[in-house]
Image (cartoon, rainbow, N blue to C red):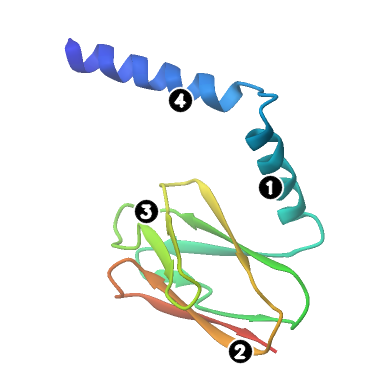
Amino acid sequence: MKNTLALAVLLACVVGSSCKKSSEPSSAQEQPVASSAMAGHAMIAVTVGADGFSPNHVELKKGEPAMLTFKRTTDSTCANEVVFPELGIKKELPLNQPVMVQIPTDQARTIGFECGMGMYKSQIVVR
């Protein structure tokens, strides 16, 4: 009973905070980042399944803003997070929820990404 009540309170807090509009400066500063992250960016969908990342090789054009959207579609994988070691980015991948990662394209290079355990590895090539 206590666990059910705690879960209900937690769910109410999460739902309430995600629906709440705030006039605080920090929220106002975060909103334009989310909006501008999508506008004018190449959007590449990456599915995270039992065999890792698909596609596992992405090519981007140098200087063209880009965003990868990861979506984990199964629990039958160790890839419950994505890590970009070179960029210092680590993001959890909740089941069936899109997770966006902005990719720097200011210079030609290869950027690796992998699951949290390093078992599935993929790369982005900026040309």
Marks 1 and 4, how far apart in space?
19 Å
Name the residue rendered at 46%, 79% in the picture. 122
Tell me the kind of residue under disc 3.
Answer: Thr
Q: In this view, does 46 lie above or below 14?
A: below
Q: Name the residue under label 3.
A: 74
Residue 81 shows which numbered tag? none
- Residue 25 image offset from top left, x and y in percent: 68, 33
Say whether residue 3 is left or right of residue 81.
left
Q: Name the residue under label 2.
A: 109
Tell me the kind of residue under disc 1.
Answer: Ala
Query: Going from the N terminus, do you reach mark 1 or mark 4 first?
Result: 4
Query: Going from the N terminus, do you reach mark 3 or mark 4 first?
Result: 4
Marks 3 and 4, how far apart in space?
24 Å
Residue 34 shows which numbered tag? 1
**Residue 117 in which image quadrant:** bottom left
Q: In the picture, which quadrant includes the N terminus?
A: top left
